[in-house]
Image (cartoon, rainbow, N blue to C red):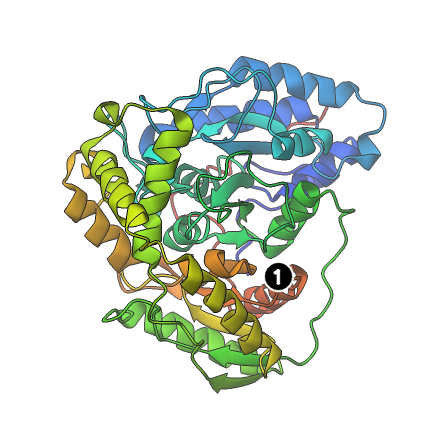
Amino acid sequence: MNRQGSMAEFGSPRVGATAKEIARAVRRGDASATRVVADHLDHLGRADSVVSAFRVVRAAAAAAEAEKVDQQPDLGNLPLAGVPVAVKDNTAVAGVVTGNGSRAAAAGVADADDEVVRRLRGAGAVIVGTTRMPELGLWAVTDSDDAAVRNPWRTDRTAGGSSGGAAAAVAAGIVPLAQGNDGLGSVRIPAACCGVVGVKPGHGVLPAREDDAWYGLVEHGVLATTVADAALGLDVLSGARPTPLRQPGRLRVAVSMRAPAVGVWPDAGNRTALADAARALVDAGHDTALADPPYPGSLRTGALWTAVAHRAVAALGVAPAHLQPRSRWHAAVGGVLERWGLAGEDAQRRWRVGAADFFGGGFDILLTPVLAGSPPPAAGWAGRSWLANVAASARLAPYPGVWNVAGLPALSVPVGIRPDGIPGAVQLVGPAGSERTLLAVAGQLELLRPWRRHAPTFPRTDARLAGP
């Protein structure tokens, strides 16, 4: 496995080290949180001028908070001691504007941290900034009127959305771990675009978001370059004691290429990634079989997607005229479809039962693509028409959203490199409570199909973090 940026001589990590490596070095006194954060902020200044992952950089505040970490007497009990972490722009960080990816929908300066941010800080993490997202988190591309988040693997392509800034920051080595959230694929889509691990836990595992504009579909999640870091981040956010992953045993794996959307088929790069992952799981000792989940034809995820836009605009008290045209139209269409009863709440309930029966009736996990195509260009989407944005998002990622409706855990894991030079990816889905099983299986893929942890030109690893 390529261990770009792994532990250097004398036990001190380099920029681009994993979260576990950094925390271990800080706990042992081989490196200080102050130096770790300073070096990552220095790298941020260089890398973010290329990828535009951050909306707010908390340079001075992060430096001061790193000093406080170094002064804590219980460093040995901090699983993320000194680890630089990024938080998505729709999650409250005290003293920072919660922007929601929008000039019109910005919620003002937060008085207090969101619960997941509080847990990150309690574990010793240092919040270096907030990452960009598309307006209201509605789109599978991340850009705004003033910036487009670029894919570190190919800067002419999008990093995905809506947690696009988080994925780009991790793939560029700016932070080893980032928080995101996922309403219809918003962690897994950018993770797949940028070649990192993205985890959406099942419903109720992590603290819920405060608003219910998304029908309870949104779950906080984590993005990281290794499965171990993703597992550590999920443990911290869930309030669990971090524990190593265990081998999952022999599992029954359903492999499905069928998309929930009619008329959508994955391209060659995504088909190859799926086939390669299936072979790797056979090599790991699992039983695989081709089997499609019982996606109901009446499950109108497209209508649901617009309805949440309508509800989010109302919940935030935003004047629709102040939104970007694409978002304004999306919310308007959603209002009409919701009034007509086309958001499909009965179909959602039936799908949740059908999804649970699928896993209860013969399969332990499901393997599917994440994306159907290649990440589109990284410019101009905020100014394009509503139809252009809907088509691009729908074509890119038809697979993840149904699992938010089902309330089941799912994650994206890198597999191979596509012909366009961007990492391939697959999605692992499981029944309620299977987060650690999915992570353990992802760990087997990481061992059997190792991936490059960062895009080829990131991060700069010539600056070894100094000692205390």
User: Which image quarter is the C terminus in?
Assistant: top right
| Relative height, residue 244 to residue 210 (above, below) | below
Tell me: 343 left or right of 170.
left
Residue sitting at 66 percent across and 38 percent down?
A: 22
Residue 29: where, in percent of width, then height? Answer: 78, 30
Q: Residues within 10 Å of mark 1 (few under 14, many from 20)?
A: many
| Relative height, residue 234 to residue 104 (above, below) | below
Hey, which residue is sitting farthest right in the picture?
A: 73
Secondary structure of residue under mark 1: helix
Residue 239: where, in percent of width, then height? Answer: 73, 42
Q: Amino acid at mark 1?
A: Leu
Q: Which residue is mark 1?
A: 439
Tell me: 404 left or right of 103.
right
Residue sitting at 18 percent across and 42 percent down?
A: 386
Residue 380: where, in percent of width, then height? Answer: 18, 36
Residue 149: where, in percent of width, then height? Answer: 32, 36
Taking the image as drawn, is residue 157 in sight?
A: no
Q: Nearer the viewer, residue 323 or 353?
A: 353
Tell me: 418 left or right of 237.
left
| Relative height, residue 304 to residue 152 (above, below) | below
Q: Nearer the viewer, residue 344 or 438?
A: 344
Q: Nearer the viewer, residue 215 or 9?
A: 215
| Relative height, residue 82 to residue 432 (above, below) | above
Tell me where residue 49 sits by quadrant: top left
Taking the image as drawn, is residue 439 in sight?
A: yes
User: Which image quarter is the N terminus in?
Assistant: bottom right
Instruction: Tell me how many marks there are.
Output: 1
Residue sitting at 44 percent across and 39 percent down?
A: 213
Residue sitting at 70 percent across and 26 percent down?
A: 32
